[in-house]
Image (cartoon, grey):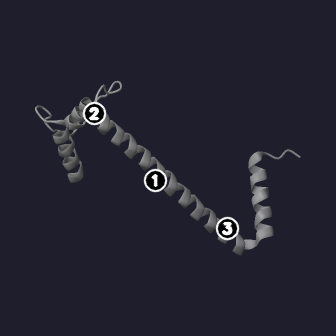
Amino acid sequence: MNIGASEWVIIVLLLIFLVAGSNKLSSLARLLGRATGEYEKAREMIQNEKDNSRSAESNISASSSVPRIVGPVGSEREKLETIARSLGIEEAELTEDQLRSLISRKIKKS
């Protein structure tokens, strides 16, 4: 007997129909449809989150306000100046305490 793959699928489906009955088969199909729908929603949501995170990363890297820090900062003053520049604060002629308070105020506004 030479039975192909498509014939086996038909035979298996007929056996399931005979064993389960039409009522259980329809509820099983409904359950399978719901599960497939939930899977598609979750897959789409994850894809959207990936796309959003990629676009946020590209916006951050393209932004000129984010300072590029190559290595460790040499002093507390350099650190404060870098943060001040990234927030748009002119750091010239300000003491470290003045810079700290301006940075603190600017961050609290955001």
x%, y% of residue 88? 17, 38
In the rendered view, tell whether residue 12 sits above or below residue 86.
below
- Label 3 Cα neighbours within 10 Å, binned few <14 / some 14-19 / many ≥20: few
Q: Nearer the viewer, residue 61 or 106?
A: 106
Task: Please name the residue that numbered disc 1 is placed on.
Answer: 45
For image coordinates 34% across by 42% down, the residue present is 56
Which residue is most to the bottom?
23
Residue 28's label in the rendered image is 3
Q: Nearer the viewer, mark 2 or mark 1?
A: 2
Helix or strand or loop: what does disc 3 sit on?
Answer: helix
Residue type marked 1: Met
Task: Please name the residue that numbered disc 2 is placed on.
Answer: 62
Number of numbered discs on residues: 3
Residue type marked 3: Leu
Q: Nearer the viewer, residue 64 or 35?
A: 64
Specify whether 54 is left or right of 18: left
